[in-house]
């Protein structure tokens, strides 16, 4: 079965909102063996929406539309699809009752158009929801053997409806014998070309699998895909290949999972080793610790930190020797090391990371934008430091990439000085 995805919304077409729904839908249906070969994005215009549906109907058996099923005048996806199909929409009693009860509990007044969220095809199937207000609606055109499906646009509502209602429905109703099994492997601190070179023998000899490499700054995600019969469900080749890849890149491996991050890896690793971390941030202004504390359970290992943006604040809050700043400047390994060591002392943590540098857009005190100094101090061990000359691609780029390198430095110190030598302490 071929899938075509149509994401609907003027804000998507104009670039005001990033279109994450297309990826979510493609991944969700691929998990049950229904693959997307074409995608369209269209604004909230009935004429253009029907044109998109007409094109999709020429090349797909399942047409999924996401967005435009809310309670406003420009939410016209269901109406446009109904007009194209020549079908009637009715108000689903169960969903309409839920909407009315919801507004009553919230002590809110129903708007005149609220009923639109309960519309469904008279001769179709309604996907009820309590994760939002707008129900999904499915119509099967028997003469063309095609399914047409309308789903909500808000990503959290779409995800919930897919997982709870839509995917189970299609698993049961559609005879789809081939499924796609995937494994997501994450590596940190290694480049894409280096990964491709190291894994070239494995990729060449493994014809039954698709191995794709996706690169983010300092983060490589490998996706291993295998088509397989649901009945057999044989994952031996997939698992064996994954283990071979991990063995080749073990020094860079941070874990499995589509959404796995270096932040999650560091929090988990620090927990395993019973270590705590603090931070002294100048360049990044708190970004380094902010990203780490987004991980659930971070409070067990993150002690806290200092944002010391000005030179005098480094002296006042961290007690950095002013002579270090005067002689070497704040943009130096001497200052970064002093920041890390003082942060370690004041916080009482096991490790402390310091970041200082020039974010840009221009140079400062003769130091070019992108010149960054990192230092990681740890108890009873020499302080590790690193100088970076990052591309000057804007302040956010420099700050984000410096943070990524900072995480890499923490990882290296933890693995080399704590994990390997834990028994010697």
Image: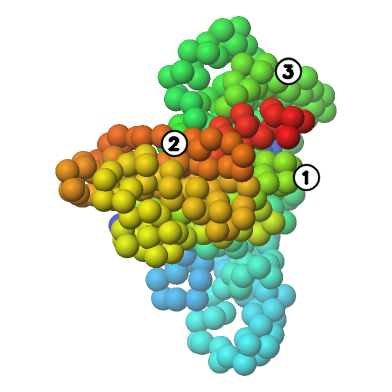
Quarter holding the C terminus is top right
Quarter of the image for residue 55 reads: top left
Query: Within 10 angstroms of label 2, few (less than 14), some, or many (20 or more) residues?
Result: many
- Residue 413 sits above or below residue 64 on the image: above
Q: Residue at x 73, y 46 (%)?
A: 274
Q: Secondary structure at mark 3?
A: helix
Q: Earlier in the sequence, mark 3 or mark 1?
A: 1
- The residue beneath circle 1 is 172
In the rendered image, residue 366, in percent from the top left (x then y), is placed at 17, 43
Residue 385's tag is 2
- The residue beneath circle 3 is 240
Q: Residue at x 56, y 32 (%)?
A: 412
Quarter holding the N terminus is top right
Query: Within 10 angstroms of label 3, few (less than 14), some, or many (20 or more) residues?
Result: few
Between 128 and 282, the one lying in front of the other is: 282
Please say whether residue 257 is visible from this viewpoint: yes
Total marks in image:
3
In the rendered image, residue 23, in percent from the top left (x then y), is placed at 51, 45
Q: Residue at x 55, y 14 (%)?
A: 199
- Front disc: 3 or 2: 2
Q: CA distance from mark 3 to mark 2?
A: 38 Å
Please say whether residue 404 is visible from this viewpoint: no
Residue 191's tag is none
Q: CA distance from mark 3 to mark 1?
A: 30 Å
Quarter of the image for residue 385 reads: top left
Q: Secondary structure at mark 1?
A: helix
- Residue 120 sits above or below residue 93 on the image: above
The answer to whether 122 appears left or right of 327 in the picture is right
Q: CA distance from mark 2 to mark 1?
A: 57 Å
- Front disc: 2 or 1: 2
Tell whether label 2 touches label 3 (CB within 8 Å). no
Between 29 and 258, the one lying in front of the other is: 258
């Amino acid at each position: 079965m071929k899938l075509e995805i149509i994401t609907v919304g003027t804000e998507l077409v104009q670039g005001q909102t990033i279109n994450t729904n297309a990826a979510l839908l493609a991944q969700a249906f691929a998990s049950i063996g229904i693959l997307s070969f074409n995608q369209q994005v269209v604004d909230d215009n009935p004429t253009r929406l029907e044109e998109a549906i007409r094109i999709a109907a020429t090349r797909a058996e399942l047409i999924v539309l996401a967005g435009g099923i809310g309670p406003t005048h420009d939410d016209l996806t269901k109406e446009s699809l109904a007009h194209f199909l020549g079908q009637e929409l009715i108000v689903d009693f169960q969903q309409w009752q839920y909407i009315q009860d919801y507004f009553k509990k919230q002590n809110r007044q129903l708007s005149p158009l609220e009923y639109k969220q309960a519309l469904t095809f008279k001769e179709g199937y309604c996907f009820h929801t309590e994760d939002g207000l707008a129900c999904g609606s499915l119509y099967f055109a028997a003469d063309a053997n095609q399914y047409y499906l309308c789903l909500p646009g808000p990503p959290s509502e779409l995800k919930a409806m897919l997982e709870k209602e839509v995917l189970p429905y299609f698993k049961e109703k559609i005879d789809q014998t081939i499924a796609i099994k995937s494994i997501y492997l994450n590596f940190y601190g290694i480049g894409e070309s280096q990964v491709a070179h190291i894994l070239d023998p494995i990729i060449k000899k493994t014809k039954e699998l698709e191995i794709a490499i996706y690169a983010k700054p300092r983060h490589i995600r490998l996706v291993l895909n295998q088509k397989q019969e649901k009945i057999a469900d044989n994952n031996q080749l997939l698992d064996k290949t994954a283990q071979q890849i991990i063995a080749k890149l073990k020094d860079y491996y941070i874990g499995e999972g589509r959404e796995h991050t270096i932040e999650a890896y560091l929090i988990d690793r620090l927990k395993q080793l019973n270590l705590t971390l603090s931070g002294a941030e100048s360049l990044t202004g708190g970004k380094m610790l902010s990203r780490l504390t987004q991980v659930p359970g971070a409070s067990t290992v993150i002690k806290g930190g200092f944002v010391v943006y000005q030179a005098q604040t480094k002296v006042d809050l961290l007690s950095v020797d002013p002579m270090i700043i005067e002689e070497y400047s704040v943009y130096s390994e001497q200052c970064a090391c002093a920041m890390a060591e003082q942060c370690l002392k004041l916080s009482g943590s096991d490790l402390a990371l310091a970041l200082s540098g020039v974010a840009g857009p221009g140079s400062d005190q003769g130091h070019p934008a992108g010149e960054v100094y990192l230092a990681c101090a740890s108890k009873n061990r020499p302080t590790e430091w690193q100088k970076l000359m990052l591309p000057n691609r804007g302040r956010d780029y420099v700050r984000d990439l410096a943070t990524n390198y900072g995480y890499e430095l923490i990882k290296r110190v933890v693995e080399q000085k704590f994990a390997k030598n834990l028994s010697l302490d």
